[in-house]
Amino acid sequence: MDWKISICEENCTGCRICQMICSWANQGRFNPSLAFITIESIDENDARFRVRFEPGCKNCGLCAAYCAGKALRKERGPRSV
């Protein structure tokens, strides 16, 4: 199944759980720097974050499945032929 991951940055709390599950699923280690998703602080005083997918992301949807803040949501994407 192909997934499309939609982002609602306003809901991101900066917890980085998405990075942890991505790095575990793809690299076998809990290390945010190994993830195919990056969370960056935009404004530390306002707790706002930017969410960015890196090259290599397979759209597996695990980041969205574990996102407690609902900043990421997986939706059915175009079907592969």
Image (cartoon, rainbow, N blue to C red):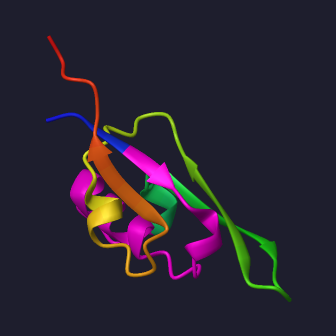
- Magenta region includes residue 23: yes
- Magenta region includes residue 10: yes
Q: Quadrant of the N terminus?
A: top left
Where is 80 relative to 74, above or below? above
Q: Residue at x 40, y 47 (%)?
A: 5
Q: Nearer the viewer, residue 36 or 31?
A: 36
Left or right of 39: which side holds 74? Answer: left
Q: Nearer the viewer, residue 52 or 55?
A: 52
Residue 6: x percent and y percent? Answer: 46, 50
Residue 66: x percent and y percent? Answer: 30, 72
Left or right of 33: which side holds 47? Answer: right
Q: Which residues are magenta?
A: 5-31
Where is 58 relative to 66, above or below? above
Q: Residue at x 49, y 75 (%)?
A: 16
Q: Quadrant of the C terminus?
A: top left
Where is 39 relative to 67, above or below? above
Q: Residue at x 38, y 71 (%)?
A: 20
Left or right of 58: which side holds 10? Answer: right
Residue 78: x percent and y percent? Answer: 27, 25
For the view shown, which residue lies furthest in the bottom direction? 45
For the view shown, which residue lies furthest in the top direction? 81
Residue 75: x percent and y percent? Answer: 30, 47
Query: Where, by quadrant of the figure, is residue 79 drawn?
Result: top left
